[in-house]
């Protein structure tokens, strides 16, 4: 491609950041994403150093007719951050963080990871809801929703977004907030990476003490039904300022797990609290009175920053992954029976099934206040994840995920799911996930800000036909 080569040479001279071509050292590392099952070769990779360079990159791609992919933390299950033959815009250099502790606000670059953000905010005993794994990007996770230990206490990550600086498809840099471009701001909170490249996120922060009290209780498959029914009721009884997670998994090979259970599949409930050890003990006291007590348990204080990293090793960079998810209104006895039947059929020790409770502050946010694609009535996100060290294991566990999902599907109101958990983000699934009303509203906003669908490597919202482009925004910065 001599023409592109010439254009790349000229672009290199003027670009405000790093440019990596296929012949450059580091290309293979730069194009890799978290899911090792994704193997794509962009024509060019750029790492902009600020919003002007992001605009330069978008303009260059459009001028050369290159497809655009945007990489934040690189953790999209579908590998949305990397494309074949196009321009991969890698935001990892945009990782500046500024905490304003008295105002309880933080501003961070669009390529920041949760590990970086947690470390900075926890210095002030503050935090905002992030995911359960600290290597994920703030960008993708927030734009699609964002759930983790603090969901009941503080809502979704996107519920805490105060403003965003965003570079749009036509290269403008604008601010989105309640006051500036409010429709765009609404769309950014749940509508994913459809509307432009966010170069700075501003979040509201919450008081989160540096020490968490953590309880982890595990039942083997034989006692799984009792354990899961109990876990469901326990989670629903917890105060909103506590966090929790239910999971089907293989017990870790860790010193706190008795040897006979290490590596064996089973079910766990994890309960995190930020009060005193006594308050935590009172909240989990029903476990100790069970007729079918857990096979093992761990109750320990753990720094919040470490809590955010405790699953990192089980989901390392480069694992082969496939997953499917559903929203369940209830974790019914029938759903639990399916869970107990299906979990032991997995092959890979790393494959697991996290079930995220959605309640508390999450449910107190009005359904229409953000574009988040899921009901605020309180539900469970049931995520079936094949996580494998080899492609051969993935071939087996991909089928396991599909069979499990098919068995569980009748328990869900629809086949839609949390958009950040869609490995296969086809149009119908995306529309069902948002529901027709929200999808149509998002499609109108998409048409105003990205009428040619430049940003389509995501859970894609297609621009609605016949919508006028956005007027020059009041807050345009450049
Ligand atoms: C191991 C693992 C654990 C996870 N745990 C959780 C969890 O606990 N809670 C949860 O809610 N989700 C979780 N997720 C899902 C996660 O939210 C999504 O995978 C999300 O897309 C990851 O964001 P990223 O920036 O790392 O991804 P990337 O692959 O870099 O980006 C995905 C897409 O997001 C968009 N994007 C990213 N950054 C920007 C930006 N700055 N501006 C515009 N668009 C952008 C782009 O469209 C991009 O293609 C997990 C995923 C994995 C792989």
Image (cartoon, grey):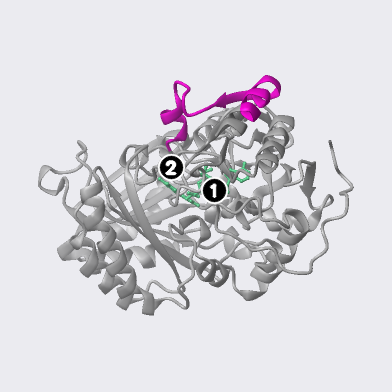
Q: Earlier in the sequence, mark 1 or mark 2?
A: 2
- The circle drawn on residue 141 is 1
Answer left or right for 115 relative to 400.
right
Q: Nearer the viewer, residue 305 or 39?
A: 39
Q: In the picture, residue 293 is in which quadrant?
A: bottom left
Tag 2 residue: 40
Q: Calculate the distance from the C-alpha at mark 1 to the C-alpha at mark 2.
A: 22 Å
Residue 470's x, y, as percent?
A: 83, 56
- The circle drawn on residue 307 is none
Identity of the residue drawn at 80% across and 53% down = 178
Please tell me whether mark 2 sits on a helix, a strand or a loop: loop
Identity of the residue drawn at 21% across and 50% down = 393
In this rendering, the label closer to the viewer, 1 or 2:
2
Q: Marks 1 and 2: CB-CB under 8 Å?
A: no
Residue 284's x, y, as percent?
A: 36, 55
The answer to whether the residue bearing label 1 lies less than 8 angstroms from the nearest atom of ligand 1 is: yes
Identity of the residue drawn at 63% across and 23% down = 9
Q: Nearer the viewer, residue 367 or 182?
A: 182
Answer left or right for 52 relative to 323.
right
Residue 289 colored magenta?
no
Magenta stretch: give its range: 6-32
Quadrant in which the N terminus appears: top right
Residue 267's x, y, as percent?
A: 26, 58
Estimate how packed mark 1 is, as few (under 14), some (14 to 19) or many (20 or more) residues with alpha carbons within 10 Å: many
């Amino acid at each position: 491609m001599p023409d592109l080569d010439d254009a790349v040479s000229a672009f290199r001279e003027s670009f405000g950041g790093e440019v990596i071509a296929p012949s450059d050292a580091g290309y293979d590392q730069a194009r890799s994403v978290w899911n090792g099952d994704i193997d794509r070769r962009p024509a060019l990779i750029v790492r902009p150093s600020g919003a002007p360079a992001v605009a330069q990159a978008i303009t260059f791609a459009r001028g050369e007719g290159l497809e655009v992919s945007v990489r934040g933390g690189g953790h999209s299950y579908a590998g949305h951050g990397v494309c074949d033959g196009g321009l991969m815009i890698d935001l990892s250099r945009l990782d500046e963080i500024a905490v304003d502790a008295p105002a309880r606000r933080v501003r961070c670059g669009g390529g920041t990871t949760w590990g970086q953000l947690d470390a900075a905010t926890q210095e002030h005993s503050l935090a905002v809801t992030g995911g359960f794994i600290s290597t994920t990007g703030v960008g993708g996770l927030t734009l699609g929703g964002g759930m983790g230990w603090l969901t009941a206490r503080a809502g979704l990550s996107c519920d805490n977004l105060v403003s965003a600086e965003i570079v749009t498809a036509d290269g403008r840099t604008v601010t989105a907030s309640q006051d500036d471009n409010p429709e765009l701001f609404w769309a950014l909170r749940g509508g994913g990476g459809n509307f432009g490249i966010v170069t700075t996120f501003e979040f509201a922060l919450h008081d989160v003490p540096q020490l968490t009290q953590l309880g982890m209780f595990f039942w083997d498959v034989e006692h799984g039904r009792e354990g899961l029914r109990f876990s469901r009721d326990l989670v629903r009884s917890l105060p909103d300022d506590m966090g929790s997670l239910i999971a089907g998994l293989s017990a870790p090979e860790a010193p706190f797990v008795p040897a006979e259970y290490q590596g064996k599949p089973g079910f766990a409930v994890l309960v995190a609290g930020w009060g005193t050890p006594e308050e935590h003990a009172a909240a989990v006291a029903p476990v100790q009175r069970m007729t079918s007590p857990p096979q093992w348990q761990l109750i320990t204080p753990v720094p919040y920053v470490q809590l955010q990293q405790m699953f990192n090793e089980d989901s390392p960079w480069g694992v082969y992954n496939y997953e499917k998810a559903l929203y369940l209104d209830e974790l019914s006895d029938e759903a639990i029976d399916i869970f107990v039947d299906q979990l032991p059929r997995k092959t890979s020790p790393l494959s697991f099934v996290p079930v995220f409770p959605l309640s508390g502050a999450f449910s107190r946010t009005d359904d229409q206040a953000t574009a988040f694609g899921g009901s605020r009535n309180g539900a469970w996100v049931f995520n079936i994840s094949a996580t494998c060290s080899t492609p051969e294991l993935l071939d087996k566990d991909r089928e396991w995920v599909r069979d499990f999902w098919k068995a569980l599907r009748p328990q869900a109101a629809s086949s839609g799911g949390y958009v950040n958990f869609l490995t296969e983000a086809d149009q119908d699934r995306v529309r069902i996930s948002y529901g027709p009303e929200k999808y149509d509203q998002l499609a109108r906003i998409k048409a105003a800000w990205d009428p040619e669908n430049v940003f389509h490597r995501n859970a894609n919202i297609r621009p609605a036909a016949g919508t006028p482009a956005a007027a020059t925004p009041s807050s345009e910065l450049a």
